Image (cartoon, grey):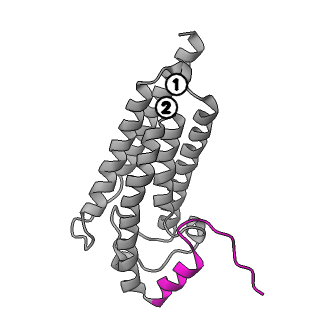
Amino acid sequence: MDNSRYELLIFIYLLLLGYAFERSVFAFNVPHNKKTNQKKWLSTVPVLSYVFFFFVSVIEFSNKNILALNLVIFFIGCLILIFGIIFRYHAVLTFKKNNQCWFAHIEADKVNFIIVDGPYKYVRHPYYASVMSELMGIALALNSYISLFFILIIQGGLLCLRIISEEAELIKYFGAQYLDYKLRVGLFPRKEKRSA
């Protein structure tokens, strides 16, 4: 293996280690409400799945020849990962800027109002969008295509179940106000509808 590929391999593992450290620090600084009304498995299982897919992507990458790494896909994956991290912080900071307490679980009765600025203006669940971006970015950067497929199916499915549960609670608490927000803001960014 030539030196440049060896250096790239070291860089990739250092990047992964740094990301794992950042994600761990972030996760341990989020308050957990032990008396939540939400189904606890909807908080625990997606987190465990996230950790599992992180390691599966790394293992899939580790079993490849570094010379076979597609550098274009690597850099695209890195950009998606960086976008996901920035979007996650933007979502949480917007939530906190509006004097809301960020919990690991949704607690609609602890939310004073529906946030409609920052990333919440474009996506109803920017934190979950960032989680998917981060995992997909890691899998792409590592050229771990099998992991990417299962991330989309399993992690995406788990987050959809969590979104359904959260939105049911938000509708119960906010009623028509949240339903109006759902009509205006999608799960994914979409074009603004023009008035006729």
Residue, x 55% and y 67% (percent of image)? 123
Mark 1 and mark 2: Cα distance apart in space: 6 Å
Compared to residue 79, the image places residue 3 above or below, namely: above
Instruction: Find residue 194 and report its horizontal and vertical position in percent.
Output: 75, 80
Compared to residue 25, the image places residue 34 above or below, namely: below
Q: Which mark is residue 15?
A: 2
Instruction: Find residue 100 and report its horizontal and vertical position in percent.
Output: 43, 70
Left or right: where 175 falls relative to 5:
left
Left or right: where 45 falls relative to 94:
left
Question: Does the rendering let one see residue 28?
Answer: no
Q: Nearer the viewer, residue 123 or 85?
A: 123
Residue, x 59% and y 15% (percent of image)? 4
Residue, x 27% and y 56% (percent of image)? 44
Bounds of the magenta segment: 176-196
Residue density around tag 2, few if under 14, some if 14–19, many if 20 or more, within 10 Å = few
The answer to if 169 sits in the magenta stretch is no
Compared to residue 120, the image places residue 144 above or below, namely: above
Q: Nearer the viewer, residue 56 or 31?
A: 56
Per the image, the residue denoted by label 1 is 11
Instruction: Kindly state the secondary structure of the residue where label 1 is placed.
Output: helix
Amino acid type of disc 1?
A: Phe
Circles 1 and 2 in contact, beta carbons < 8 Å = yes
